[in-house]
Image (spheres, rainbow, N blue to C red):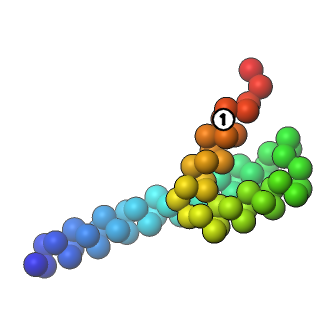
Amino acid sequence: MYITSAISGTLGMIFFILWVLLVIFTLVSILRNSNVNRDNKLLWIVIILVVPIIGPLVYLFWHSARKPE
């Protein structure tokens, strides 16, 4: 019983740290992107904060797909 709670606590903390890093990385990416206007930046920030895991991933995939070659 103790081992399961220790593992879930440790894994939970690891996933939480990874999520925080993903959100910070995505927010910095949005704010530094000069190709996105102010209204769209605000919209993306709201999406990222309201939809915790899917929001940052959608932005990162969308952003990487729209990069000019």
Residue nearer the viewer, 61 or 7: 61
Determine which residue is flagged by label 1.
64
User: What amino acid type is highlighted by mark number 1?
Assistant: Ser
Q: Residue furthest bottom?
A: 2
Q: Is residue 16 visible?
A: yes
> Could you tell me which secondary element the residue under label 1 belongs to?
helix
Q: Write the residue at 73% across / 33% down.
A: 66
- Horizontal side of 48 relative to 69 (left or right) equals left
Placement of 52 over or under 5, stated as above or below? above
- Horizontal side of 40 relative to 27 (left or right) equals right
Q: Give the quarter of the image for residue 49.
A: bottom right
Placement of 28 over or under 9, stated as above or below? above
- Horizontal side of 28 relative to 14 (left or right) equals right
Q: Write the residue at 57% across / 49% down.
A: 57
Q: Write the residue at 89% across / 50% down.
A: 37
> How many callouts does the rendering have?
1
Q: Position of residue 17 (x, y in %)?
A: 46, 64
Placement of 36 over or under 69, stated as above or below? below
Residue nearer the viewer, 29 or 54: 54
Can you say which quadrant of the picture contains the C terminus? top right
Residue nearer the viewer, 14 or 44: 44
- Horizontal side of 14 relative to 34 (left or right) equals left
Can you say which quadrant of the picture contains the N terminus? bottom left
Q: Position of residue 32 (x, y in %)?
A: 79, 49
Q: Is residue 22 visible?
A: no
